[in-house]
Image: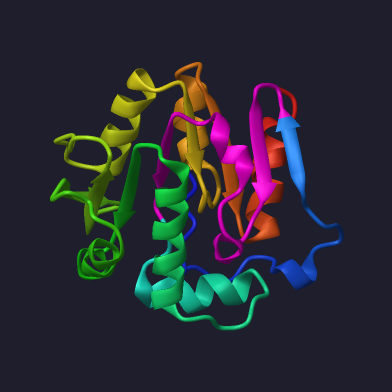
């Protein structure tokens, strides 16, 4: 699995792209370029669960720079994610850094449904909204479990589309979005012939 990380050298930014990315219908799946700061997107209405591993505070500015956006506050980013989740009225799981989890919990009541787990050997926190906590050791185990229980996942910070990979392998559908056209292009190229 490829993992979108701010720790790697920057990929192509939005300014380096030859074409603009919009909305792509790929079989029963959808991939789109969407900025979480622009609010809820109706494409996510078809999902029965949201799952996302958004940027952590220490990598947020790098992610936004890679996508060609000027700096916006991390606090506003978290507020916008929580608003998106709340407007969706769907069960949601947000994976974030342990320190960042408090900011999410201040913005959206996660009803004390949270667990510690590993994401690529880093300590993380899974926050559960409108869904009971699922006890697991890492994010891949969690994705595999929810891909058996739900039919269509939405990931609004999809990166390379690892969430889509797990759901596709399980024969389920997905709606993936990312602010960075490079990642959207990667997902479209991977899934355009399914």
> Percent position (x, y) of residue 123?
20, 59
| In front of the other: 171 or 130 | 130
Toward the right, the furthest residue is 18
- At 44% from the left and 74% from the top, the residue drawn is 76
**In the rendered image, which quarter is residue 174 located in?**
top right
Rendered position, 96 above or below 65: above
> Residue 37: within the magenta?
yes
Toward the top, the furthest residue is 171
| Residues in magenta, as a range | 26-53
Rendered position, 20 above or below 171: below
Rendered position, 38 above or below 112: below
- At 50% from the left and 16% from the top, the residue drawn is 171
**Quadrant location, the C terminus:** top right
| In front of the other: 138 or 178 | 178
Horizontal side of residue 134 vs 66, given as left or right = left
> Residue 107: within the magenta?
no
**In the rendered image, which quarter is residue 38 located in?**
bottom right
- At 24% from the left and 67% from the top, the residue drawn is 106
> Percent position (x, y) of residue 36?
55, 60
Horizontal side of residue 128 vs 36, given as left or right = left
Horizontal side of residue 18 vs 61, given as left or right = right
> Percent position (x, y) of residue 120?
31, 52
> Percent position (x, y) of residue 13?
69, 69
């Amino acid at each position: 699995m490829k993992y979108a990380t701010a720790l790697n050298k920057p990929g192509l930014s939005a300014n380096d792209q030859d074409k603009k990315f919009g909305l792509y219908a790929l079989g029963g799946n959808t991939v789109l370029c969407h900025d979480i700061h622009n609010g809820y997107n109706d494409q996510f209405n078809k999902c029965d669960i949201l799952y996302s591993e958004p940027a952590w505070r220490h990598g947020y500015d790098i992610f936004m720079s890679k996508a060609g956006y000027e700096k916006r506050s991390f606090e506003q980013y978290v507020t916008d994610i929580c608003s998106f989740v709340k407007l969706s009225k769907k069960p949601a799981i947000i994976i974030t850094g342990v320190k960042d989890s408090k900011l999410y919990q201040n913005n959206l009541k996660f009803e004390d449904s949270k667990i510690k787990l590993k994401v690529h050997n880093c300590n993380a926190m899974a926050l559960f909204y409108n869904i009971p906590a699922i006890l697991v050791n890492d994010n891949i185990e969690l994705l595999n479990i929810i891909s058996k229980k739900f039919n269509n996942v939405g990931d609004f910070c999809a990166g390379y589309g690892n969430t889509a990979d797990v759901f596709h392998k399980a024969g389920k559908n997905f709606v993936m979005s990312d602010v960075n056209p490079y990642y959207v292009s990667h997902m479209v190229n991977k899934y355009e012939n399914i």
